[in-house]
Image (cartoon, rainbow, N blue to C red):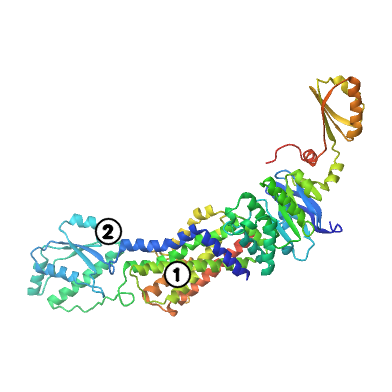
Amino acid sequence: MENFKPILSAFSLSKRFGDILAVDNISFDIYKGEIFGFLGPNGAGKTTTIKMMSGILEPDSGSVTIHTEDHRRSTGICPQHLVVWENLTCLEQVLYMGRMYNIRSQEIRKRADELLGSLELTGVKERLAKNLSGGMQRRLNIALALIHSPEIVFLDEPQAGLDPQSRILVRDYIRSIKNRTTVVLTTHDMEEAEKLSDRICIIDKGKLLVTGSADEILNANGEEDLVEIDFVSDVRNEFLPYSGDELISGITVAGNKMSFKTRNPQSSLENILKVIRERGLEVKGLHLRKKSLEDIFIGLTGRSIRE
Amino acid sequence: MKTLYCFIKTFKENLRDWKIMILAIVFAPFFIYLMYMYMGDSGSSVYNVVIVNNDLNGKISEELISEWGKIKTEEGKSVLTIRAINDTLKAREMIKNKDADLFVIIPPDFSDSFNEFIISKTGLLSPIRSYGDQANLKYMVAASFVDYTMFNYISQKTGIEIPFNVKYEFAGRGKSLKEFDLYVPALLVLSIIMMLFTAGASIVREIEKDTITRLALSRLKSAEFMAALSINQIFVGLICLFLTLLAAFSVGYSTSGSIFLLFLVGTLTCFSVISISIITACFIRTMFGLLTLGCFPFFILMFFSDCFMPLPKINLFAFAGNQVYLNDILPTATATRAFNKILNFDSGFSDISFELFWILALSLIYFFIGTWLFKRKYKY
């Protein structure tokens, strides 16, 4: 982030479609040079927000300010669905879009070669888009959003439908452009969001629930690590009250398995192991699962299926 | 320059999405051959007359029938095809089935009454009766030829001068027009109407794939997009027009009208159809929709163009000394009229200046409505 200078400010954005309030009075800043991840379940309002930010959709109320000189030249969008010209080759459409942004001919050619190379489309640049694989079309979709070197690019689920190799390629590419382009991306993939984003915003039912870096969100949302212990034989409930650790919560015992949540795994485990030794119980396995963004996401948005 | 790039891109797409393009290009030439197959090279319009001659022993009736057979076009071809039968009921049936345009009954005493008149110079000839279907436009023409030839023949034979004279002149370029010739201008218009699909496809493709959003976010203005689309489709339309005209020439159609004027009217008509296709595309989001719902405006354009059926003239208003009819609210009817004037009547620029003005005016009105709707709907 370059001196925490906002490149985009959304203020009190709202959008309604009939009876559905898709986006409900949300405000946030996106800083220059950062990767800003938009997380939310299906129908949360991510795409509507992106559309309002990119200027495709007019908000019912509120405003989006992009702090650049030339709004059109400075933004690029890669929509969730494929937006390519099926009957043009990869190269033709990348060049075409470049020309539509008034880029000089030599510059477009160079930029197109670079972009297609980075997204590993050079080998198929003369192939019609309709004859490309789904993954290649997705990468072309990204290339079309970036041909004019926008200052801010909106990537709406750019990795949806990609195989693992392509996901890594796209992830690395997004990281590589970070310094010169501010990236706003939406995703369902918590791990990707955590790995890629400098800051994350979780949105649900049109409302902004939380914003911050992954660590900030993890620390601020009080989720605890989960400890699971497998015993050789069944454990009895009377054993449990002896744990005497106030940091432990949510103890559950089922057969030979016991699990609990803790804010401080190290000291909690010391206490638990002491009790285990005193009781002469034999431990078969012990698993510690770190609290994750997904836990927080589920905690904030619930488990119900949306769409 | 962006208009040029957009034109090249759209042209490439049209070539690569060849199915709609081929449909548009071959449709009208196919109809040219189809029409020719049905109408054939039958010379000028021919009228079928069936005669029941009950005056079996009379020479006068035979001579009269022979006179009817002598009516020729300027190319020397018979105007009336005469068929003698003796079954009145069958003759009436032929009229009903449009197998004949006129049915003439010569009474048994026709020659006798004629001869008596020659001697006595008084009385009336036994009446010749004719029968026809008023809804059949050819009936009145056939009756007119038959009647006048008969009056003329009787005048000559009796020596009674009839104080009027009629000379038949045929419209056209110094020769009489065939029925097929009258369909050629309409089929040329049909070739342009087919552009409703190619022009519509160029817009709907962008809408269906949402590439219109990419363009809207770029620096391509909607006016540049529309200009590129129009130039591209006018080019396609003129190819369709040329191929349809070529098809007509290949089956013997000829014209000494101005080809330049023809293509000028063609260009304006293409523009008008493109404008209507922009309006159509504002209500359709998919190619499937274009090929199904798009048929409605296609048939409306075809219906109002007088392509296949002449419509009754419903006056709307007069403008600059020219009557504007209801079907003139769509440009294709005016285009058909202009093509007909150029091709079949050798009309020059001044003769079709109103048609040119009217097509241009309608094109601009529809174009502005189309672009306004498009901007409103797609915020572009």
Q: Residue at x 10, y 72 (%)?
A: B117
The image quarter in which residue B34 lies: bottom left
Q: Which of marks 2 and 1 is nearer the N terminus?
A: 2
Q: Mark 1 lies on which chain?
A: B
**Are the residues flagged by discs 2 and 1 from a single subunit?**
yes
Residue bearing mark 2: B98
Tag of residue B335: 1
Q: In the figure, residue A224 lies in which quadrant? A: top right
Neighbour class for label 1 at 10 Å: few (<14), some, many (≥20)?
many
Q: Is residue B131 left or right of residue B4?
A: left
Q: Which amino acid does label 1 sit on?
A: Ala
Q: Where is residue A211 drawn, in percent x and y?
A: 82, 48
Mark count: 2
Q: Which amino acid does label 2 sit on?
A: Lys
Q: Nearer the viewer, residue B209 or A192?
A: A192
Give the residue at x 63% y 65%: B222
